């Protein structure tokens, strides 16, 4: 059975393992992850400005979701923007990603967020099947 729960500092190794299998455009450095990004995200989740959830099965973290809560003027409230979702490759297609999304949607309702958004290019069909619809084109500018 899979359990969805808040990520904790003790999940760092499992999340990093999943992260390195997820990213395609970046190479996350372990030192920066441990010293900067992971602690900041744990803190953001604890103060309500992020949702950082893990899926756990048999005491092992098999997936995670990271979404940031962004106050907006245009939407008349906060938007929960889903930035990262991954499940261990051998376990994909068994409902874990869906469970993580549904948990984030429930949290968005509780927080009275206006909407949940997700920029994606690889998983649009997955999100459409969960009721998301395309509303914009996502562009980026890199400082590097």
Image: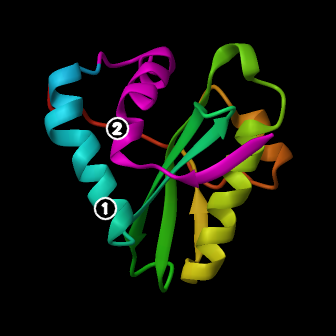
Asked if residue 120 can be seen in this view, the reply is no
Q: Which residues are magenta?
A: 1-27
**Rendering coords of residue 128 (x, y %):** 79, 45
Q: Is residue 67 above or below residue 11?
A: below
Q: Which residue is under mark 2? A: 140
Where on the picture, by quarter, is residue 9? top left
Please state if 23 lies on the left or on the right of 37 as rendered. Answer: right
State the SS at label 1: helix
Q: Is residue 4 magenta?
A: yes
Q: Quadrant of the N terminus?
A: top right
- Residue 39 x %, y %: 23, 47
**Considering only order in the chain, which callout, 2 or 1, is on the residue closer to the N terminus?**
1
| Image point (67%, 64%), residue name | 105
Residue 69 is left or right of residue 106, and the answer is: left
Q: Quadrant of residue 71?
A: bottom left
In the image, residue 86 above or below residue 47: above
| Residue under numbered circle 1 | 44
Mark 1 vs mark 2, foreground winner is 1
């Amino acid at each position: 059975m899979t359990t969805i729960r808040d990520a904790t500092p003790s999940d760092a190794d499992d999340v990093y393992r999943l992260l390195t299998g997820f990213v395609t455009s970046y190479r996350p450095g372990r030192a920066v992850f441990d010293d900067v990004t992971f602690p900041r995200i744990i803190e953001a989740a604890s103060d309500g400005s992020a949702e950082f959830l893990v899926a756990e099965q048999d005491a092992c973290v098999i997936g995670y979701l990271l979404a940031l809560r962004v106050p907006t003027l245009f939407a008349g409230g906060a938007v929960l923007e889903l930035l990262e979702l991954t499940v261990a490759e051998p376990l994909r297609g068994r409902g874990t990603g869906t469970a993580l999304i549904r948990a984030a949607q429930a949290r968005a309702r509780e927080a009275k967020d206006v909407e949940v958004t997700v920029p994606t290019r690889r998983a649009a069909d997955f999100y459409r099947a969960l009721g998301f619809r395309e509303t914009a084109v996502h562009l980026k500018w890199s400082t590097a």
